[in-house]
Image (cartoon, grey):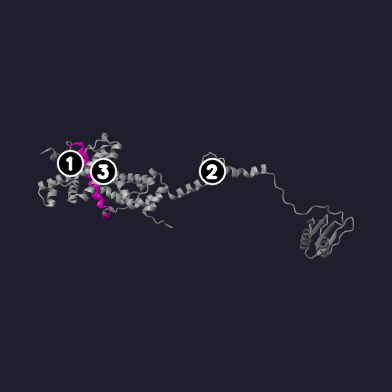
Amino acid sequence: MKKQWDDQSAINDIRAGKQEGATYLFNKYGGRLLGFFQKSFSGLSNEDAEDILQNTFIRFINQVRKESPQNVSAYLFTIGKNECYRFFLKKFPPDTSPGENDENNIPSNVDIEREISFLDCLAKALKKFEKTEKNADKCLEILTLMVEGWSIKEIANKIGRAYGATREFLSQCRKKLKPYVQPCRDDTNKW
Amino acid sequence: MNQEDKETEYWLAVLSGQSVPDASPEIIREAQALRMALNFREAQTLRTAPEFRQKPPNPKILKNVFKATGLEPEWRWNLKNILKKISHLFQSLFIWKLTLPFPAVIMGALLLVTISPVIMQIVIPPIPKPEPNIIAIPKTKYPVQELIVSNPQATAEALTIGLAKLGISITLVKEDEVWKVGIADLSTDNPDALSTLLQKHRLKRLPPPMTNHLSVHISAK
C-alpha cells in the first residue's frame, strides 16, 4: 500500500535516517524554492539556483536530525534564504559590490555567519518597522523599487511626485529605519 | 551637499545595486543586507504565486543530498535494522560479551552451524536405540507349536500384544512367510489371563522343566 505523506511524517522519516520523507519534501518544495531563489536574485543562473537548493536541503536535513521544526515550509524557506545569502556573500563579499568580485577576497565562515545573523535581524527589524511606523509600507514599497533597479526619477513618475520630494521621502525612510537597523549593527559588531 | 545627504546618496546607490567605492564599509554592508532583505521580503509575498509552482527540480540534486547526508532507502534501512536486531540477539546470548565485530560473530555462527554435527558425533556418544521389550532366545531346542491361520500376521501381532500386556518378553521373526514367536520366560503376575490368551490361540504350555518356554510358528492356510 502506498504511504500517505505529510510534512510531519516526512520529518519523522528523515529523523529515522530514511530517504523517502526527504524525497517527498523535495518534490513538494524544491520547485517553489528554486522560484524563490530566482525571484530573490534577478539574473541568478539555473546552475547557481540548483547549487543553492542542494545546500538548502543538506542543511535542512542536518538541522531536522537535531530538532524537529514546527512549520516545515517556513523553516525550509528560512534555510533557503540563508543559503542564498551565503552564496551571495561568497560571490560578492560585503566590501565589494556586485560586478566587483575579487576571487582573493572570499570571506571566512565566521564572517558569513555574522552577516547571515545580521540579515536575519534586519528581516525582523523590517517587520517591526512595518508594524510600528506610519507610512512604513509605502517606504518599503519604494525602497523595493530601488532594489529592482528603478531610478528616483522613474519612481517619482510612478508615484506622481516631484523628483526632490521623492528623494526627500527616501531620505526620511532611511532616517526612520535607522533605529530599527542600529541594534542589528550593534549585535553583529560584537562578533 | 552635507555629510548625511552624501551618505544617503551612497546608501541609495548601493541599495539599487550600484558599485560605490567611496562609500564607507558600514553603509555598503547595511545597504547590501537591506537590499537582500527587501528582495527576500518581496519573494516571500509571492511564495504561493503560480510562477513559483515549478516542476520538481533535477533529481540529481536529491542524489547529491542523500550522498551528503547519508540518508538511506527504506529497504536498506529495514535490512540494517534486522541485522542490528540479530546482532543484539547474539550479544545477549553470549554472557561473556564477546568484543568481536558483528560480521565476525555472523561468520562464527555460520561456522558453528556447519561443524556442529561433526562435533556432536565426536563429543556426545551415540544414543542407543530403544530396544523393543523382546529378548532373544535360542531358536529351538524346545518343541514348536504350529498354528495355521488365515491371517498369520494378524494372529502373530495379536499374540505378541497380548503377551506384552502381561509383561512377557517375546521375539517375533518372519521367515519364509512363517511368523516365529519365541518366549523364554512365560512367568507373569496374571497367570489366569495368560491361560486365557493361550487357550484363545489354541496353544499349550509345555511340561516341566520347559513350562516357561514357548515357541510358536504361525503360517497361512
**Residue A87 image-quadrant placement:** top left
- Name the spot of residue A116 as percent of width and height, x first: 28, 42
Label 3, residues with CA under 10 Å away: few <14, some 14-19, many ≥20 = many
- Mark 1, Cα crowd under 10 Å, few <14 / some 14-19 / many 20+, is many
Q: Do the residues marked 1 and 2 share a common chain? A: yes
For the residues tagged 1 and 3, is the chain the same?
A: no
Residue closer to the observer: A20 or B59: A20
The residue singled out by tag 2 in the image is B91
Q: Which residue is mark 1?
A: B11
The amino acid sitting under disc 2 is Gln
User: Residue B52: x and y, percent?
Assistant: 27, 53
Return the chain for callout 1: B
The stretch drawn in magenta includes residue B27: yes
Chain of the residue under the numbered disc 2 shown in the image:
B
Question: Height in image: B204 above or below A41?
Answer: below
Q: Is residue B182 magenta?
A: no
Asked which secondary structure carries label 3, the reply is helix
Q: Amino acid at mark 1?
A: Trp
What secondary structure is the stretch in magenta mostly built from? helix
Mark 2–mark 3 distance (CA, rounded to whole Å): 52 Å
Would you identify the image quadrant in which residue B36 lies?
top left
- Chain ID, mark 3: A
Q: Is residue B154 visible?
A: yes
The boundaries of the magenta stretch are: B23-50
Q: Amino acid at mark 3?
A: Leu
The quarter of the rendered structure image containing the N terminus of chain A is bottom left
Element on which disc 2 rests: helix
Which sits earlier in the primary sequence, circle 1 or circle 2?
1
Q: Are marks 2 and 3 on the same chain?
A: no
User: Crowding near pointer 2: few (<14 within 10 Å), some, many (20+)?
Assistant: some
Provide the residue designation for mark 3: A119
